[in-house]
Image (tube, rainbow, N blue to C red):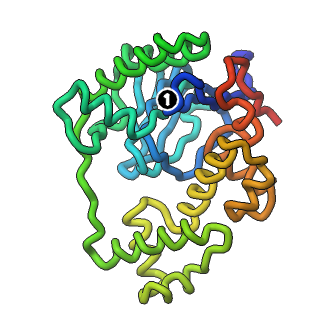
Amino acid sequence: MAAGGTREWARHWQYAELPDLDLLRARYVRHTFPRHSHEGYVFGSVTSGVEDVGLPGGTVHAGPGTVVMINPEVPHTARAGVPDGWVYATLYPSAQVVNDIAAEVTSLRGTVGFDETIVRDPHASRLITEVHRAAEEGNALAADSLLRVMVVRLLDLHGSVLPTRAPHAAGARDAAEARAALEARMENPPTLVALAAELGTSPFALLRAFKKQYGMPPHTWLTDARVRRARRMLDAGTAPAEAAAAVGFTDQPHLNRHFTRIVGVPPGAYQRERARTYKTGTDLSP
């Protein structure tokens, strides 16, 4: 990668020995991640440049020596914070992994989370990159150990128990029912007007309630949910074209566009990289 160049590359993969952990190592310059969320946790370490992460509370600027921590289902965006973009290593452990670690070695009980979104912690930042290095070298013992040390460190310093959000208010109940309807009818979803009529509310009231509950409007949430389901299908060996049709995208290019924007790599590259030994990242240059 030439200094000052615009070449982008990325590798999003899963190490077979640690099946509940996804890994992404990449350089992005022009690529921007639209608003989306993850079922598990996000731990990111920028090694060069600056990443601007857009969160419900505002934008944070992540540079070398910092760690970005995002709790499950928190909507966020990401883009370059400087002209040369950013290079980073990110870990995506499942909620089960992090909560099991918390239950074993901390006093936190319930669903745990992190009070801070970004902290300056060069040691934890190095641990994230070392997990990547160990996985790339096929050293399962080191990768697993370093992951746990990193999670425990961040839990000890910044961990808390996430509050339970029960949908008591009518708007929250409508939002939850709308989400369930969209999940169940992903291939052929209703319009906002039709969905609101089914729930006995107005379109704008439903739009406001959904965004308040989930941090994004229904159509944005649906695109994210479709990509999530497509990922699970690709993990199971489904061809990208078949996955595109199954989740409601009009065709494979439609899936390719949204999948690449949200996941950071094209679906074909994502599928090829699952549980493979280390190789050079996918070149994303046009």
Rendered view: 55 above or below 97: below
Q: Which residue sits at x=38%, y=18%? A: 124
Q: Quadrant of residue 263?
A: top right
Q: Which residue sits at x=57%, y=31%? A: 82
The image position of residue 247, as x and y in percent, is 67, 61
Secondary structure under badge 1? strand
Q: Which residue sits at x=48%, y=46%? A: 38
Relative to 154, 257 lies left or right? right
Quadrant (top left/top right/bottom left/bottom right) for the C terminus:
top right
Rendered view: 150 above or below 14: above
Relative to 250, 10 lies left or right? left
The image position of residue 278, as x and y in percent, is 67, 17
Relative to 142, 219 lies left or right? right
The image position of residue 152, as x and y in percent, is 30, 23
Q: Which residue sits at x=69%, y=44%? A: 234
The image position of residue 21, as x and y in percent, is 50, 31
Type of residue at label 1?
Leu
Q: Residue furthest left?
A: 107
Residue bearing the label numbered 1: 91
